Image (cartoon, rainbow, N blue to C red):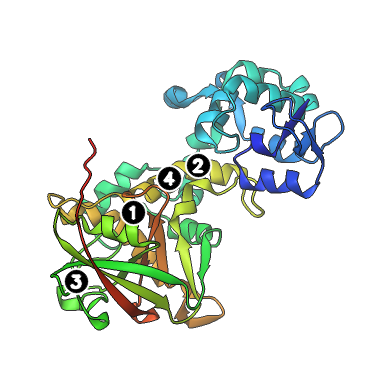
Amino acid sequence: MICCENCFKDSEIKSIIKSYSKLGKCDLCGSDDVNIYDTECDDYLIELFEGLFDIYVEEDKFEDKSHQDKMKLLKDELKENWDIFENSITPYMIEVTISNICKDYFESRSSLLKSRVGFLRLTDSEYLDNNSIVGRYDWDTFVKSIKNKYRFHTDIFVKKILKEYCTHLVRVVKKDEMFYRARISGITGHISNEMGAPPPEIASAGRVNPAGLSYLYLADSQDTTVYETRASLHDYVCIGKFRAVQDMRIIDLTRLDSISVFSAGLDYAFHAINRGHLKRINDEVAKPIRSSDSQLEYLPTQYICDYIKSIQNEDNLTEQAYQGIMYKSTMINTSYNLAVFDPELFECIETETKNITTVAYGY
């Protein structure tokens, strides 16, 4: 059987298949003249997939029955909980593909394809305490704890796990790279030095910063930053163009839930128990702020982002390891926002004022 780079969403698998530069036609998705993997003669994906399958066991091997509602057939588990295959690849196609890639493996473990399967480590409290971002608890328990019990020193959140994941999420913002910030204004707009972050004494709480900490919020495009202001019809919006004054290391949360399980250095079981938590962090940081929201709603993401800010450079413990956090925009799906811990790392080089002439609402 022949599959190809277009069958996979996982960046590591796609990269590996491309590196062999073997062109042909795909039996699975029908793509032609693409980089292919032939299960009859290629074997470099076998070890990767078998390592992932080894973390699963059949339903009847679980003594603890409390997790039965989370168990699925392996083909459905791979489709719903892992971003390995492209969306167009159905569970049936996934089963055919993995059966051919790991033919010998499933000859000895055929029940793994026929039975519902689960992740045995989910029932191991000691393992969870040491390897899950929220220990043996779930995300909602962490949220309740940080809101109502321990504001600054909760033991539920395991910081060392997030610190390890941060090494897989670094993006370098280069000196002179451009970002944008918008403010509702009058017809004359604002001058450049009025477009920066608010001073600490009036800095209100957001999903990344607590009240009193002044962060600079930027966007990757003018359209994104205008949408983020939620300006009304006929408002004037002043857009500032900001230039990075130096290279800086940013934690890119937009990649949190798409880290490849096959990345070097990631343990399969470790990643399996944290994928859901990572996706929740990504969604919570990007969640739109509403005027009716209580500031308590921001506490979990403020806690996480403040910890990221506190991580020190291992080569120079007097310096921060990371200078900001990037997260997806909820206003434009393909865009992202940047929260910079030190506003002095950017300078506003020009401004432009726009009149909002149309507003679109969706429901």
Residue 239 point in image, percent of width and height: 28, 69
Q: Which residue is mark 2?
A: 273
Q: Quick check: 256 above or below 40?
A: below
Nearer-the-camera pick, 93 or 21: 21
In the image, taking residue 299 as reference, residue 108 lies left or right, namely right
Report, in whole angstroms, how far the alpha carbon at label 2 lies from the one at label 1: 20 Å
First in sequence, mark 2 or 3: give its number: 3
First in sequence, mark 4 or 3: give its number: 3
Nearer-the-camera pick, 49 or 138: 49
- Callout 1 crowding tier (Cα within 10 Å): few <14, some 14–19, many ≥20: many
Q: Which residue is mark 4?
A: 279
First in sequence, mark 4 or 1: give its number: 4
SS at badge 3: loop
First in sequence, mark 1 or 3: give its number: 3
Report, in whole angstroms, how far the alpha carbon at label 4 lies from the one at label 3: 28 Å
Quadrant in which the N terminus appears: top right
Looking at the rendered structure, the kind of residue marked 3 is Ala
Q: Nearer the viewer, mark 4 or mark 3?
A: 3
